[in-house]
Amino acid sequence: MAGSIGAAASYWTLMSPYSQLLGPFPYRRRTTARLVALTFDDGPNEPYTSQIADVLAASGIPATFFAVGACIERHPEAARRLLREGHVLGSHGYSHRFGRCIGRDVVRNEVHRADEVFARHLGIRPVLFRPPWLLRTPALFTVAREESLQLVSGDFAHVLEVFQPAPERIARRAVAKVRPGSIVIFHDGFDAKGGVRAATVAAVALTISELALRGYEFTTVDRLLGIGPYRDGDAPTAGTTALRAPSATCA
């Protein structure tokens, strides 16, 4: 029993989307405005990242993509398209390997290697950082302070979305979780390996349609949290839907 309690406590502290025990890790913004930020992890992953971009473009919706450095190296043009179309890119590290998420030196190396890829291919260095699997340790918060990063959590659209259940199931669960100020996590890739994401593409279209019917407007994480998306002031934002989140505190 004690072991089970300890494991549950460790999971909550280190990997729950909602725990703030180690430091600020916003998963939504407290507000009464019907604003929601759609986010995508583990890409770019073609053709699915581009298909999601097509869905977003059809509705004029901006989103936030937490991209893996190694995946940008494989699909740089997909990442450039996201920037051209006004989406915001955050960092998801370079390799998306569990062992690269623990100690201070390896976390710092993951951030720096990813930064180098973002700078070389896209001319930006993201402020937003989402750790793989939402895994955080004291070392992560130390590095985030040193590198002026904003750590970002969110609410998983569907806990099994990475295994691609039916689009209707993903969308139904995602919509049920949304509250004003929510940050919703989808996956356009899988770890740093790619993977089929056809169900996610269809689920995103369904989710957008239903949330729009419920009166939600779509924004990016940086706007929702009221911060700049990139360091050094280099923020290509032409083409976004300019939505300003009201003043509020993070959850």
Image: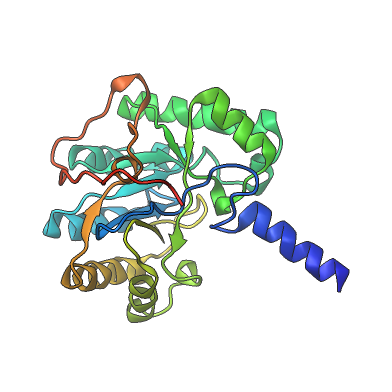
Closer to the camera, 178 or 143?
A: 178
Q: Residue at x 59, y 59 (%)?
A: 16
**Residue lying at 38% horizontally and 65% vertically, measured from the top left:** 197
Q: Is residue 217 above or below residue 1?
A: above
**Residue 187 in view:** no
212 lies left or right of 29:
left
Q: Position of residue 148 (x, y in %)?
A: 48, 26
The answer to whether any part of residue 140 appears in the image is yes
Colouring convention used in this rendered image of the protein = rainbow
Residue at the limit of the structure toward the right, as seen here? 2
Query: What residue lies at 41% left-to-right and 67% top-to-bottom?
Result: 157
- Give whichever of 93, 44 is nearer the camera: 93
Q: Nearer the viewer, residue 44 or 61?
A: 61
Percent of width and height locating residue 83? 24, 38
Q: Position of residue 205 (x, y in %)?
A: 23, 68
Residue lying at 36% horizontally and 75% vertically, measured from the top left: 176
Task: Give the farthest residue toward the top.
Answer: 232
Q: Is residue 57 left or right of residue 161?
A: left
**Residue 34 image position (x, y, % from top left):** 25, 60
Q: Give above or below for 30 relative to 208.
A: above
Image quarter (top left, top right, bottom left or bottom right) of the N terminus = bottom right
Q: Is residue 148 above or below residue 220?
A: above
Q: Identify the image quadrant of residue 91.
A: top left
Instruction: Give the tally of numbered discs.
Output: 0
Residue 196, quarter of picture: bottom left
